[in-house]
Amino acid sequence: MTNPAQLISQVRAEAAKITWPGRREVMTTTLMVFVMAGLFSLFFFLVDLLIRTGVSTVLRTVSG
């Protein structure tokens, strides 16, 4: 069992090892997230359109 003083010391030592991303890296990552979200939304829109068109065609054919 670690006493509270040792725990705080260990936490501080680990926190000192943290390297935060730079502004450029944050901006690049954020831009990539938005681009991928846009691409996925376009993909799912097209898949939904394809399925809707297929189902509508089948229903129109079956109902006569």
Image (cartoon, rainbow, N blue to C red):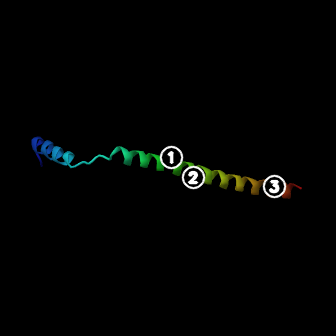
| Disc 2: which residue | 39
Look at 18% across and 45% down and name the residue there. Answer: 11
Please tell me how crowded label 3 is: few (under 14), some (14-19), or many (20+) other residues with Cα within 10 Å. few
User: In this rendering, is residue 3 above or below 58?
Assistant: above
Q: Position of residue 31 (x, y in %)?
A: 47, 47
Q: Quadrant of residue 62?
A: bottom right
Of 15 and 61, nearer the camera is 15
Please tell me how crowded label 1 is: few (under 14), some (14-19), or many (20+) other residues with Cα within 10 Å. few
The tag earlier along the polypeptide, 1 or 2, is 1
Image disc number at residue 42: none
Secondary element under disc 3, as helix, strand or loop, is helix
Compared across the picture, whether 49 is left or right of 9 comes to right
Q: Quadrant of the C terminus?
A: bottom right
Q: CA distance from mark 3 to mark 1?
A: 37 Å
Q: Position of residue 30 (x, y in %)?
A: 44, 46
Q: Amino acid at mark 3?
A: Leu
Q: Position of residue 5 (x, y in %)?
A: 10, 41
Compared across the picture, whether 15 is left or right of 42 comes to left
Q: Amino acid at mark 1?
A: Phe
User: In this rendering, is residue 50 above or below 20?
Assistant: below
The tag earlier along the polypeptide, 2 or 3, is 2
| Disc 3: which residue | 59
Q: Nearer the viewer, mark 2 or mark 3?
A: 2
Look at 38% across and 46% down and name the residue there. Answer: 24
Of 45 and 23, nearer the camera is 23
| Disc 1: which residue | 34
Q: CA distance from mark 2 to mark 3?
A: 30 Å
